[in-house]
Image: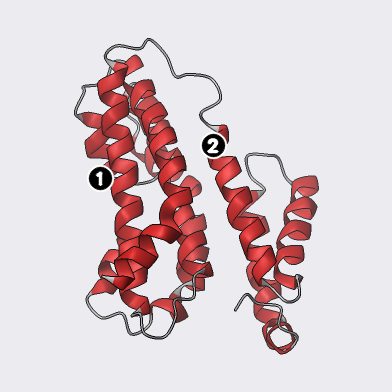
Amino acid sequence: MPAFRYAFSASLPVLTGYLSLGIAYGIYARAEGVSVWLPTLMALVIYGGSLEFVTITMLLSPFAPVQAFAMALVIQARHLFYGISMLKKYKGAGWKKAFLIYWLSDETFAVAFSVHPPSPIDKYWVYFFISMLDYIYWASGATLGSIAGSILPAVPDGLSFIMTAMFLVIFLDQWLKEKKHYTALIGILCAVFCRFLFSSNTFMLPSMGLILVLLSAFRKPIEKEGGFAS
């Protein structure tokens, strides 16, 4: 199926990152003493990346539902911006939209937002397969890590940097596609500006909010100048 082949090719950077970090997550969870099946279940149900790492700590701490809810909301609130950004892309997806919403992650957003399938290929099937494959990659990595965690005592050093490298590759690919680099520069400058104003743990949401405001305000002139990837 052309849409699946296109989606699989586009998702390959995520495959490397998700398998590696998912394995690290599974190993970490087992090292903390959780059941062998729990990392897989959390990967399938929560599907929240960093939230899943934090959830392991919360499960092993005294019961505090309000604190857990607030923590989950803060960590995953960036998905509000992802969802707003994908409204136009996912409009008209039909029954696939429910899966696209549930399977939306940082990496899936980055890939799905940047791909532009050629006209013979149904773009909604491409978005669907990208989201589905990323979901499978993460769950598979968590499962493999959980099994390996029964043998290995700790998370190997350096695995977490794979996700940083993956985002760098996606950013560079987007940079090369843009005729003008307005969106990339807005993202970089907003992140640097907010990092000076906020701590490393809290600057993400203000950065994304500022990026959203600026891109919305200057959307027409940026599009006119070819500042969005095509």
Q: Sequence order check: which comes first, mark 2 or mark 1?
A: 1
Q: Is residue 161 left or right of residue 88?
A: right
- Residue 216 lies left or right of residue 12; in this view the side is right
The residue labelled by disc 1 is: 44
The x, y position of residue 39, in whole percent, is 27, 31
Q: Say the numbered circle drawn on residue 63.
A: none
* Residue name at image x 44 percent, y 19 percent: 155
Tag 2: Cα neighbours inside 10 Å, few (<14), some, or many (≥20)? some
Q: Amino acid at mark 1?
A: Leu
Q: Amino acid at mark 2?
A: Ile
Nearer the observer, 68 or 31: 31
Q: How far across and how far down the image is residue 33, in percent?
A: 29, 15
Question: In the visual, does 23 lie left or right of 226?
Answer: left
Q: Position of residue 37 (x, y in %)?
A: 19, 29
Compared with 229, 186 (above or below) is: above
Q: Could you say which is closer to the camera, residue 208 or residue 130?
A: 130
**Where is mark 2, residue-wise?**
162
The residue drawn where x is 59% and y is 41% is 164
Residue 173, percent across and down?
62, 61
Total marks drawn?
Answer: 2
Q: Residue at x 35, y 80 (%)?
A: 121
225 to 116, vertically: above or below: below
Taking depth in this image into account, of 111 and 210 the one nearest to the observer is: 111
Colour setup of the view: secondary structure
